[in-house]
Amino acid sequence: MLKALFLDMDETLCDTFKANQVAKQKMGEAVAANFNLVDGQGFADAYITGIYREWTEAQRARYMPIIEQQSESAFRVQLIRDLLAERGVNHVSEEDAVALQDKFDADRIEAFDFYPGITGFLAEARQSLTLVVITNGPIFSQVPKVERINLAEHVDHIIIGGEELEQKPAVSIFEKALRLAGCEANEAIHVGDSLASDIAGAHNSGITSVWVQHQQPLDAELGINPHHTVMHPDEIPELIRNLHNR
């Protein structure tokens, strides 16, 4: 019997891609306007790559100590200064870099929201299931998102990876969700868009998985096959209803 529904937040419940695109566009415009001859959109693309930690080994060696010894915010400010320096803009003040960082954050949060129809589905599902959101990411970025959409009003529990000792796909974070929901692994379903984090983590914990594929290919190298797949979040409600009624 299904008792709990675990859900990823970004690209599962909420259109993070759209929010990123809005903020990225505005960041690029601001950079192009303030720094002559800099390709603003190229800069903004590199910034998004950086904050999602798609790093070279050299970047990892540079940025991880900043995150560990200072903060996520300090890393992002340094990333901005480094990216501008790579484009010939040297001696950018910390104040100017902070202003760009703050603008990106504000623009992204303003654009961040649920996918259409998701809040109605959560209200329906919550009548018979315990809802637990499990989201990876640093407190710096995830807490403002959670607050922006008033997520606590729509689900029973929220687990933010940056507040835990381990993040998805670690079994520990799924075990915490099971404890909060008061159920066994075979009584829960986890829905998420990341094969490596959501689906692998669910499988390692004995939980039925639902992969939100979007336009992603199924990566054969990972060797991860979701139990169920939907192409877009708008297909989640019908699938969960069907699985719940079995």
Image (cartoon, grey):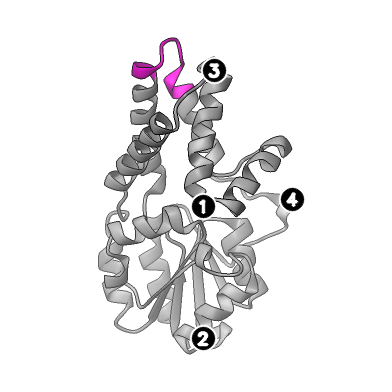
Residue contact between numbered discs 4 and 3, judged by CB atoms under 8 Å? no
Distance between mark 4 and mark 2 Cα atoms? 32 Å
Q: Residues within 10 Å of mark 2 (few under 14, many from 20)?
A: few
Q: Mark 2 points at which residue?
A: 179
Magenta range is 32-42
Decide which of tag 4 and tag 2 comes sooner along the chain.
2
Image position, residue 222 (x, y; %)? 71, 54
Location of residue 102 with respect to 118 vertically, above or below: above
Q: Is mark 4 on a helix, strand or loop?
A: helix
Decide which of tag 2 and tag 1 comes sooner along the chain.
2
83 horizontally vs 146: left or right: right
Q: Name the residue under label 4.
A: 221
Distance between mark 2 and mark 1 Cα atoms? 28 Å
Image position, residue 179 (x, y; %)? 51, 86
Distance between mark 4 and mark 1 Cα atoms? 16 Å
Distance between mark 2 and mark 3 Cα atoms? 50 Å
Q: Which of marks 4 and 3 is in front?
A: 3
Q: Mark 3 points at which residue?
A: 87
Q: In the rendered structure, find residue 213 and report the number of the disc placed on it.
A: 1
